[in-house]
Image: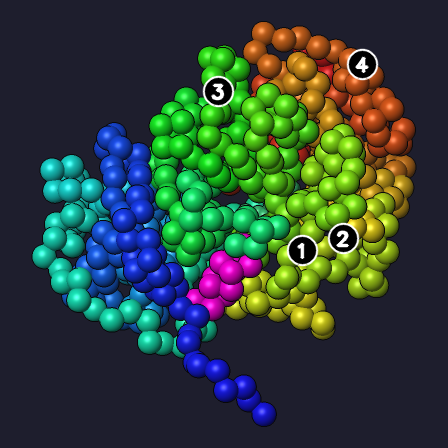
Amino acid sequence: MHGLMQAWPLTLDKILDHAKTWHGGVEIVSRSVEGPIVRTTYSEVHERAKRVSNALLELGVEAGDRVATLAWNSARHLETWYGIMGIGAVCHTLNPRLFPEQLCYIVNHAEDRIIFTDLTFLPMLLEHRDKMPTVERFIVLTDEGHVGDTLPGALAYETLIENASSDIPWGGFDENTAAGLCYTSGTTGNPKGVLYSHRSNFIQTLITLGADVLSLRATDVVLPIVPMFHANAWGLAFSAPAVGAKLVMPGPKLDGASVHELIETEGVTFSAAVPTVWQMLLNHLRRTNGKLTRLQRVVIGGAAVPEAIVRAFRDDYGVEVTHSWGMTETSPLGTLATPNPAIAAMSPDDRLRYQLKQGRAPIGIELALVDDDENDLPHDGATFGRLKIRGPCIAGEYYRGEGGRVLDARGFFDTGDVATLDEHGFMQITDRAKDVIKSGGEWISSIEIENIAAGHPKSELAAVIGVAHPKWDERPVLLVKLKDGETATRDEFLQFLDGKIAKWWTPDDVVFVDDIPLGATGKIDKKLLRERIIRSPQSSSP
Ligand code: AMP
């Protein structure tokens, strides 16, 4: 027997409709690519997004067509998202930090018909235009005066929507219709497309609004530093309008001074970003003796949060940190380290141990921990295993079946992360499956060692990789990039690790390097690092 409640497809246009109707006057503030701060409201964004929809229809875009964006976080980018999705087209977010060759591969694979781009990326597009044969138009997110004739076939966004009508119905299609496409960074093989549906993003939005998840409110002022081109800005382009929170969009400037200025002048209460961004902000605050007068909470994820960042926010600035884990394939929020009653009752330092874990699953996320033979492993906080995940916001397959079957017999997706689960249900990532070091049949967590090494006062960045060993298969080697002007010895670092990790985890060597390469999403590129080390072994003395 079916229930008798109303059919109300969970389509994303309803989120912006809601923001316009009930929070229409709430501001969206953007640092524009052209420079000035630009202010608009949910009402105006809604109106202009509808013009985008009509303009796209006039250009011949149909439901299911892929329309790409290559842009920083801004109100125009938000209008573009909703304009594309509202008519059932697919918004394909392109990550400008990828190499041009990878970008071309992705554009061709998705068969994008139109690319909305910021001015910043015009030179790159101009250079590679011929390698994107499916793209009919480039729309530059600016006004006529700024476009010029830089790119053949390019249109100014403001001109495009100026004469378009804002009269158009949105939605009216099945909630399982594709809404967004985002490719994984592809450190192994070609990038693969994750195709979100209206329903999956709508449900993700509802999940993230929970008080133990992002806990957003109409009174919040939200600064999504995490880019809209990387895993949906962790859903903030949906969750902020869903609650009617003021949005502050940082545009291209993510350095400490620019972020600090926006936080203070716009009264930001909530923000989200990867650890490197917070490190830049904290360095700036220390240098300038700056204060955070309004900021209350930050969510940190994308990479493990270093203890020093949590302590600095907590002790020096009174800001609460929530550590979160997720991936493009999980829409992206998977777990958050918000305390349960037992953890909330602990001393601040004991609580910190749990804050540094990646946390627990909210409703709508199921986790499993298995060994290589798919046997479930104990949740004892010590046994490592492959982390698997299942739920309505988790990828069921990649776009165009790339990579084949990705779900196991129970319908779980293998995250490629190695983790532990403890008695509180707190998950801790110990490694990527491909980076874990297998030594004498046991597993060593490269991340755990590098996080400790990164806490050495002379260390700017640390990475641990496994190198082949005749007896133990693999042994860890620590690579350290020292802070400017510092010198150090191998033993200094090994002594620093002593007592903090198991003896047999102690790296066989410490190599001081000039550079630790980061990939397109700001994570250490271990593949490249391994290639470099194998090609040119370096001395351990600086
Ligand atoms: P991406 O799809 O580019 O967002 O990358 C997802 C991957 O980033 C995950 O599978 C993890 O390996 C890593 N990751 C994300 N969040 C965290 C975190 N809080 N701690 C450690 N690794 C993380």
Q: Residue at x 77, y 40 (%)?
A: 345
Considering the image in quadrants, where does the C terminus appear? top right
Residue bearing the label numbered 2: 425
Q: What secondary structure is marked by label 3? A: loop
Image spot of residue 114 (x, y percent): 27, 57
Label 1 CB-ligand 1 distance < 8 A = no
Q: Amino acid at mark 3?
A: Lys
Q: Are marks 1 and 4 in contact (CB under 8 Å)?
A: no
Q: Tell me the CA gap for discs 3 and 2.
A: 35 Å
The label nearer to you, 4 versus 3, is 3
Q: Tell me the CA gap for discs 1 and 4.
A: 40 Å
* Vertical side of 516 occupied by 485: above or below: above
The label nearer to you, 3 versus 1, is 3
Q: Which residues are magenta?
A: 197-208
Q: Are marks 1 and 2 in contact (CB under 8 Å)?
A: yes
Image spot of residue 375 (x, y percent): 84, 63
Q: What secondary structure is marked by label 1? A: loop
* Vertical side of 295 occupied by 385: above or below: below
Tell me, yes or no, whether the highlighted magenta stretch contains residue 424. Answer: no
> What mark, if any, has residue 291 been given in the picture?
3
Q: Residue at x 43, y 67 (%)?
A: 198
